[in-house]
Amino acid sequence: MRKVVVTGPECSGKSVLSENLARHYGVLWVPEMARTYLEGLGRAYREEDLLHIAQAQIKAEEEAWKALPAAPWLIHDTDLVTVRIWGEEKFGRSDPWVVRQTEERPYDLWLLSKPDIPWVYDPQRENPHDRDRLFTVYERLLQELGKPYVVVGGDEQERLRQAVRALEPG
């Protein structure tokens, strides 16, 4: 199984691309657990909530990996790179366990989604004005970690074309 992560700043088309890739390849995708966690929280999130979100994301990934060992692809709508950056941006640090996971968890490719689509309000989104700066933060971290990544951008169909091209052999 090849594991692909779709990552990038908020409102950059990650979930749509993840779902489209899963549909294209006829596979399942691991959704972003932060949304589910925060919707059920009932209060403003705190720094320690990021560790719970990270653990929920890992649990969802592990369950999918075990349930689908023969699937050719498993698409991840984000990973702990996002949680790490979120912690560093919001609280000035990230939990050491999260940092270690970003260094050690095995994935085959990251698709880094450009914030070149309109920002859409959502109560869980916080950064409508600095998505380009955050894109640079994501790209820099992927480079520092030595992770293989491909930048995708454009409209929904163009992003899918670019992603499929990145995933196809040759």
Image (cartoon, helix red, strand yellow):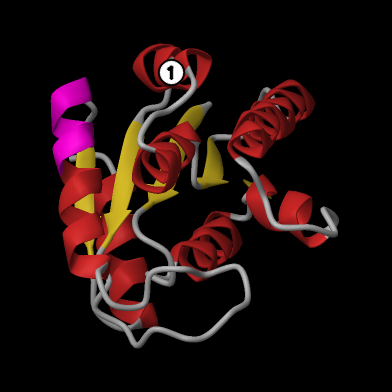
User: Dot 1, how many residues are within 10 Å of its Cα: few (below 14), some (14-19), or many (20+)?
Assistant: few
What's the magenta bit mostly, secondary-structure-wise? Answer: helix
Q: Residue at x 44, y 38 (%)?
A: 87
Q: Is residue 28 shown to the viewer in this render? A: no
The percent position of residue 70, horizontal first and vertical second, equals: 66, 26
- Give the left or right position of residue 149, taking residue 121 as reference: left
Q: Is residue 124 above or below residue 166?
A: below
**Image quarter of residue 119:** bottom left
**Image quarter of residue 103:** top left
* Residue position marked by numbered label 1 in the rendering: 106
- Give the left or right position of residue 13, taking residue 159 as reference: right
Q: Residue at x 60, y 63 (%)?
A: 23
Inspect the magenta stretch and tell me whether residue 85 lies in it.
no
**Which quadrant, please, contains the C terminus?**
top left
Q: Which residues are magenta?
A: 140-146
Q: Is residue 95 shown to the viewer in this render? A: yes
The percent position of residue 72, horizontal first and vertical second, equals: 54, 35
Q: Is residue 68 above or below residue 28?
A: above
Inspect the magenta stretch and tell me whether residue 144 lies in it.
yes
**Image quarter of residue 142:** top left
What kind of residue is marked 1?
Pro
Q: Is residue 121 above or below residue 125?
A: below
Question: Does dot 1 land on a helix, a strand or a loop?
Answer: loop
Front one among 159 and 33: 33
